Image: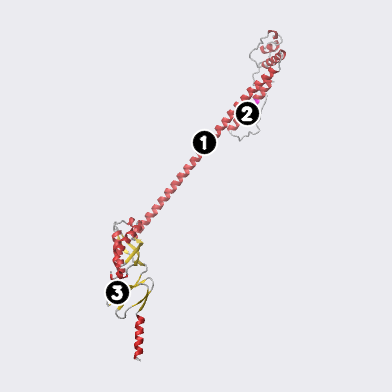
Amino acid sequence: MISIIVVLLILFLFVSCIKIVPQEHAYVIERLGKYLCTWRAGLHFKVPIIDNVINKISLKEQVLDFPPQPVITKDNVSVRVDSVVFAKVFDPKLYTYGVENPIAGLQNLSATSLRSIIGGMELDTTLSSREQINEDMEVILDKATDSWGLKVNRVELKNIIPPEEIEEVMTKQMRAERERRQTVLEAQAHKESVVSRAEGDKEAKVLAAEAEKEARIALAAGEAESIRLVYEAQAQGLEKLKEANINEGVLKLKGLEALRDIADGRATKIFMPTDLASIVSNLGVASEALGIGDYTEIDKSPIPGKGSYNDSCLKNTSSKVTKEVAGTNASIQVDLENRREDII
């Protein structure tokens, strides 16, 4: 019976000395009160009674959320800063023997570092320089905790809480700044609208002036072409008369017709032919022009036109330039008809 109890006791001691270390953990082992080794993940066996597991440490990265710390800025404003530290144990031995309470030491070191960094900044700079504060805090804490077996990977400022009266002033300042920006944007939009409208009016006037210019150029070109055609027609008529070999009788007949047109009761001058032999034949015409015989008063009313021309495209709503072009075309057409009758 005693032997069975002894065997069971030995088995119990043997089993209790078998240790399994989980992944991302480390055990610090002491033998007779002195550091022996550090166990990593896996199966381990310790000597009964003389070996002892003094500390079980997690090697995972830890998120340490410290309570808000009161800090006074350079311009004497008291703010509360809430920070978060991301740290990891890289040396279990130093973490166990380097400091009594590493987490408490890291918290106090974080508070003093915040007071040192933010104490040299004004409130506005503190609110706009969080990234710079994070980097400075990370460098300071990482350097200070190397002897504790801690590696500080990152530091973040969660909140920077100013006093209530400062928050009210900041709110008013923010509202005033937004109103100023709104006013500036409205003024800029009004300016752009006025400039765009002025540029549009300018372009419209330029286009209208160019259109009128082109219309007047076309009108002048049309008048020049009509004059050229009239003179060409006259030249062609003279060429036809020359080719027809008109005899002297026909020329005298044309001369009498011309004298008839001159002596239509409106003439104020006397035309005498150079051929004295034709004085007798033209005596009646000359006497009528001189008022001898049956006296007829000279008619000084305007000579009626020999033709007329109506532009079917001309309307009351047509522009001034269109009416001028239509009038010029009408006068050219009438003039061509009159000249054609004179040539015939």
Residue 100 part of the magenta segment: no
The disc labelled 1 sits on which kind of residue?
Val
Q: Secondary structure at mark 3?
A: strand
Residue 102: quadrant of the picture: bottom left
Instruction: Using the image, determine if residue 71 lies above or below residue 245.
Output: below
The disc labelled 3 sits on which kind of residue?
Leu
Instruction: Using the image, determine if residue 306 lies above or below residue 69.
Output: above
The percent coordinates of residue 89 (x first, y second) are 34, 68
Q: Earlier in the sequence, mark 2 or mark 1?
A: 1
The percent coordinates of residue 212 (x first, y second) are 55, 33
Residue picked out by circle 3: 36
Task: Tell me: 210 left or right of 251.
Answer: left
The disc labelled 2 sits on which kind of residue?
Asn
Residue picked out by circle 1: 206
Question: Which residue is at the far top?
Answer: 276
Query: Which region is colored magenta?
Result: 326-334
Residue picked out by circle 2: 329
Question: Which residue is at the far bottom?
Answer: 1
Which residue is at the front of the view, 218 or 5? 5
State the separation of the CA atoms marked 2 and 1.
Answer: 27 Å
